[in-house]
Amino acid sequence: MLPATVTGKLESMNDSIRAASHPEADASSWLTTVLRVAGTLDRPALDQLRPVLRLLALSCDIVILDLSAATVASPPAVARGLLPPAAELDRAGRCLLLRGASPELVAELSRARVPAVTLADEPVSRLGR
């Protein structure tokens, strides 16, 4: 659970984003946000991540969730937890992109029909060749 001070700040930011968002925004501009999860992505971490993803879904065109430094404790639970924010982004014509998702998580995302894009990581030795 997020501390009350963080929750209050998120709610305040949410109000500001809703007030600033409007459908007449310049269609040629877009916003991408990258979140890098480090450590174990378990139930408490997922509970902290979900409100942030919901907030970003209001204003970002692409939310990149970088899992390359994370250990996913339960791929089924993470897939279920990502479904609501991914669906919200998808309904708005936006995208949740997961980088560094394990094959197990990719399979669970597919089973749960999470509308997200996964990006396979290339080994460092192959980059730049």
Image (cartoon, helix red, strand yellow):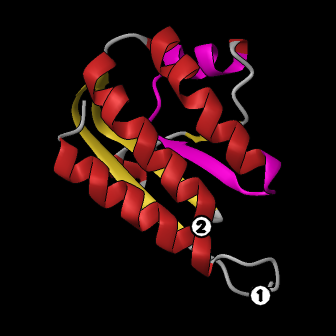
Q: Secondary structure at mark 2?
A: helix
Query: For residue 100, which numbered disc appears in the image?
Result: none
Query: For residue 28, which numbered disc appears in the image?
Result: 1
Asked if 52 appears above or below 17 in the picture, the reply is above
Residue segment shown in magenta:
91-110
Mark 2: few/some/many CA within 10 Å (<14, 14-19, 20+): many
Q: Is residue 31 visible?
A: yes
Direction from residue 86 to residue 73 in the image, left or right:
left
The three-letter code of the residue at mark 1 reads Ser
Residue toward you, 68 or 34: 34
Tell me the quarter of the image containing the N terminus. Answer: top left
Direction from residue 73 to residue 13 in the image, left or right:
right
The three-letter code of the residue at mark 2 reads Ser
Residue at image coords 41%, 66%: 13
Q: Is residue 42 visible?
A: no
Q: Is residue 95 magenta?
A: yes
Label 1 or label 2, whichever comes before in sequence order: 1
Residue toward you, 92 or 74: 92
Residue at image coords 73%, 57%: 94
Q: Quadrant of residue 128?
A: bottom left
- Provide residue 87's location: percent of width, then percent of height: 72, 37
Q: Is residue 18 magenta?
A: no
Marks 1, 2: nearer the viewer? 2
- Provide residue 62's location: percent of width, then percent of height: 61, 60
CA gap, disc 1 to disc 2? Answer: 15 Å
Q: Which residue is mark 2?
A: 59
Residue at image coords 34%, 39%: 68
